[in-house]
Amino acid sequence: MENNKKHDILRQFPSVQSILQNNIVVRFTESFPIGFIKEKIENLIKSEKNKVIGFLNSRKDDAVLKDINFTVDFFVKSLAEDLSSFSYSLKKVVNGTGVVIHTNLGRSILPESAIKNVSIISSAYSNLEFNLTEGKRGKRYSHAEYLLEKILKCEKALAVNNNAAAVFMALSSFCGGDRKEVIVSRGELVEIGGSFRIPDIMKASGAILIEVGTTNKTKPQDYKAAINENTALLLKVHQSNFRMSGFVSGLSSEDIVSIGKEHNIPVMEDLGSGSFVGLEKFGLPYEPTAQEVVKAGVDIVTFSGDKLLGGPQAGIVAGKAAYVDMIAANPLSRAFRIDKMTLAALEAVLFEYLDIERAVKNIPTLFLIAQTEKEIRKKSVKLLNKIKIADNIDKNLLDFKIIKDLSIVGGGALPDYMLNTFALRIAHKEISASGIGKFFRSCNTPIIGKIKNDEYILDMRTILEDDFKHILNALVLISR
């Protein structure tokens, strides 16, 4: 085909500008940035032009070109279809994995009170760093400080952007500038996820790591023998994401505090997945609460806000006022400071803890952990009944069954403890378990389940009733 003919045909396509001037497209610009829409139009035109070029280069009969559209209306319709399926990269998903605090799925769900407060604070100006009483600049840390001090019964508290930052700032404040030593048991040199390891964080902070004891046994004399004039801190790291059993012994918080007082050396404990509620009340194994660690006399305790606490991503530093003030004064505090939306969420979550029963009811993480088998089965039956009465779900193609299964808390907490649960097993006559999983992940609201014994299942512990409609929509689509 001659180039002139090719150019003549390609010139029949409308210009980007002519499409942008269409009344329907003008209305699209009220919801989408003009640059975004322009790029979409350019891509649509390019795609159609490539089809034409393909036909012409293959020397097919010109009749096939009748299938190519050159009208503005065609591109407006194509653009409308494209924009109707638009979604941001970060999106809501349905968690059918049974992992309550799922790091890959955003960890803790915020309670309604926190969502409402974030909306209020983020949609207007706020007194983030303004003291309303004195009419001058204030400190952002003060907004969560009062509630943390009241709940933990500590002298002072500070919130930063995550627990790794809290640990890093604390270590840097105690010994970074002077290359001081921090003593920690070998059995507590943990990896906290994402390949972030306590020894690496200590090294980066400027602290000199002094390991004592053995992997499975550490004794008081191990700490005492390592203490010298360059010792700045005794560090205890809670083994929240693994367990050692057998010929094992270590020191309690009280034991290390006693050694610290004897040698006038501060003690810090990294609690990791800090909880304000004793998990035994839910029938789970014992985990130390942040209140218990503070009561033990530890000078500084650090923990996460988005794990067992059930709040936003944050790192909490609590303990003796002199040490918390020292950490807050660290130049790193600006790099690791918490933002206004996180503070708004954290304050609302902390407020819930003024009444523990209210907190368990209103904070989703605690509520999902606390669910009984009876409650989960009831929720499973409710979803199954909705599926049974749905006319547009092909019951001949799909099969459903409620089965017993096991969930986990997640977030590095209670790694060896399984929670009894119920799950909905979904089978398709023509699609494998992995195929169902792939299809569900491609939905507008992706559904993340798990495959067990070559069967696709949704763990109902982490399925919310608001998720039912998304599951039903997915089942309708996979029935077609």
Image (spheres, grey):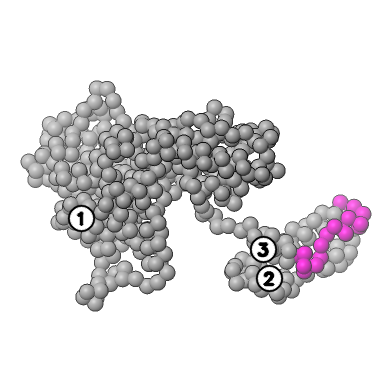
Q: In this view, does 234 lie to the left or right of 456?
A: left
Per the image, label 2 sits on a secondary structure element best described as helix
Per the image, label 3 sits on a secondary structure element best described as helix
Residue 193 location (% of width, % of height)? 38, 41
Which residue is found at the position 59% from the left and 51% from the top? 444
Displayed quadrant of residue 212: top left
Residue position marked by numbered label 2 in the rendering? 25
Distance, label 3 to label 1, CA atoms, is 54 Å
Q: Which of 143 and 302 is in front in this view?
A: 143
- Residue placed furthest toward the bottom: 135
The type of residue carrying mark 3 is Lys
Classify the position of the N terminus by image quarter.
bottom right
Q: Is residue 1 above or below residue 32?
A: above
Dot 1 surroundings within 10 Å: few (below 14), some, or many (20 or more)? some
Q: Is the magenta stretch mostly helix, strand or loop?
A: helix
Residue position marked by numbered label 3 in the rendering? 40
Label 3 vs 1, first from the N-terminus:
3
Magenta residues (range)? 56-75
Residue position marked by numbered label 1 in the rendering? 150
Residue 370 location (% of width, % of height)? 36, 41
Per the image, label 1 sits on a secondary structure element best described as helix
Which residue is found at the position 82% from the left and 54% from the top? 54
Q: Which of 321 and 153 is in front in this view?
A: 153
Q: Nearer the viewer, mark 3 or mark 1?
A: 1
Q: Which of 290 and 171 is in front in this view?
A: 290
Distance, label 3 to label 2, CA atoms, is 11 Å
The type of residue carrying mark 2 is Val
